Image: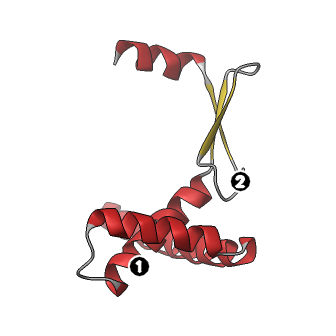
Amino acid sequence: MRKIRQFMKDCKLGFGWIDKHTFGLYSFDKKEVKINIALALVDIFIHEYMHETNPNATEKQIMKKTARKLHRLKRSELNEVGRFIVAEFNYQLELYIQKRKAGES
């Protein structure tokens, strides 16, 4: 863990879309880690959807089905799911902030 902590101090973090197959990218020149959060969130959502639609499947089967489904989705479809997740996140964050403010009053 000591080496990971040092890397956390030394590297820069960037966030953004890379492509639909890449969760992260490391640039040796810039010493930067770019994280594809949108893809990670969509992957998690589709994974949980696979549990919903395949309740008796093993985790290994779900992982395989998730990868297959992600591979088949068009970028516009990935974008649609991603926008849904972000909108819901923003909504829940706003509710949380309102509750915190109400509790502080």
* Viewer-nearest residue: 68 or 86: 68
Q: What kind of colouring is applied to the model shown? A: secondary structure
Residue type, mark 2 in image: Trp
Query: Is 45 drawn above or below residue 1 in the view shown?
Result: below
- Tell me the residue at 71%/53% (across/down): 17
- Residue 45 appears in the figure: no
Taking 34 as reference, is 89 left or right?
left
How far from the left and from the top, in percent, is residue 77?
A: 68, 78
- Tell me the residue at 32%/62% (across/down): 60
The quarter of the image holding the N terminus is: top left
How far from the left and from the top, in percent, is residue 95?
A: 43, 73
How far from the left and from the top, in percent, is residue 83?
A: 63, 74
* Viewer-nearest residue: 49 or 62: 62
Residue type, mark 1 in image: Tyr
Taking 72 as reference, is 90 left or right?
left
Disc 2 versus disc 1: distance between alpha carbons?
22 Å
- Tell me the residue at 73%/70% (across/down): 75
Report the residue marked by disc 2. 17
Assign a secondary structure to mark 1.
Answer: helix
Most extreme residue toward the bottom, as rendered?
A: 53
- Tell me the residue at 42%/13% (across/down): 3
Task: Name the mark on residue 49.
Answer: 1
State if disc 1 and disc 2 touch (CB < 8 Å). no
First-in-chain label (2 vs 1) = 2
